[in-house]
Image (cartoon, grey):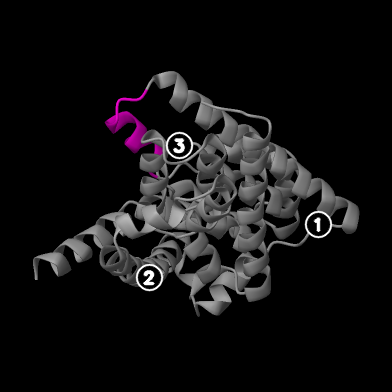
Amino acid sequence: MELIIDILMDALVDTAKLLPFLFITYFVMELIEGVAEEKSEDMVRRAGFFGPLVGSLLGAFPQCGFSAAAATLYAGRVITLGTLFAVFLATSDEMIPIFIAEQVDPSLLFKVLACKVVVGMAMGFAVDAVLRLRRRTPEHLHIHELCEQEHCECGQGPLLSAVKHTAQVTVFIFLITLVLSATMEIVGTDAISAFLSGNPAFAVCMSGVVGLIPNCAASVVICELFLEGGLSAGALMAGLLSAAGIGLLVLCRENRHAKENLAIIALLCLMGIVVGFVFDGVGIVF
């Protein structure tokens, strides 16, 4: 019974942390939708070029609230795909709390964060550049589609609409987080640690895959193993770059394009693994 209560509390706490981010995001999107469509799209287009720069800096803040917000904004096409990748790659999830708790040298924390921000920014600009070359006109805003798929009565005003959207997504996130928390408790962090140990190349690849698990335990294990000397700098980067946390759940919930979501997740993992191999290949250490 105690284990069940702990799992429920963990899921509640993890979900509660996202509520302010989700509500503010939906409220802002409702306000944007309320502006004349032409003005809204022009505003988004002009801001979109610098999106990866801003996104990578915001993503570096502790926890994964901004990744959840970015996933929602991308589903409404308020931000570009490059900005989404910038936020996801820079998201620190549990890295900062773990490093602080372990009293690591502040320079190590700064170096890892700086690398994540730079990689996120570079990849974000690269993705947007490729998309601009492939299509001449940017996508239109899809904010209204989020209302349609949720059967939202937007006539109630932006505040009530934002509350309704937030409640619906929060329930989904809580249920999935509950299942993930129970699974992680049953599997155990020791099993994940053993899974990640082995030859360096295997560790880099597996860290990238484990980082995709939208649960804080993934980034905790990766950070702890690195601090204990069980993972290289490349494996650490591979896991932390792909660790977008709850943002991946929100993306799958809000962006109703399954193939696109799978492609984004696969590319996110690939980016992390490639950067990890580059780090180990050139001998970069922290």
Residue 246: x percent and y percent? 44, 58
In magenta, the rendered stretch is 94-104
Residue 267: x percent and y percent? 67, 57
Q: What residue do we see at 21% from left, 64% from top?
A: 7
Q: What residue do we see at 66% from left, 51% from top?
A: 79
Q: Nearer the viewer, residue 271 or 154?
A: 271
Q: Quadrant of residue 12?
A: bottom left
Which marked residue is nearer to the observer: mark 2 or mark 1? 2
Which marked residue is nearer to the observer: mark 3 or mark 1? 3
The label shown at residue 138 is: 1
Residue 21, visible in the rendered structure: yes
Q: Is residue 248 above or below residue 112?
A: below
Name the residue tied to disc 3.
Answer: 61
Name the residue tied to disc 2.
Answer: 176
Q: CA distance from mark 3 to mark 1?
A: 29 Å
> Which residue type carries mark 3?
Phe
Mark earlier in primary sequence (3, 2):
3
Tell me the quarter of the image containing the N terminus.
bottom left
Q: CA distance from mark 3 to mark 2?
A: 23 Å
Mark earlier in primary sequence (3, 1):
3
Q: CA distance from mark 2 to mark 1?
A: 33 Å
The label shown at residue 253 is: none
Secondary structure type for disc 1: loop
Residue 119: x percent and y percent? 65, 37
Looking at the image, which residue sits at the far left?
1
Mark earlier in primary sequence (2, 1):
1
> Which residue type carries mark 2?
Ile
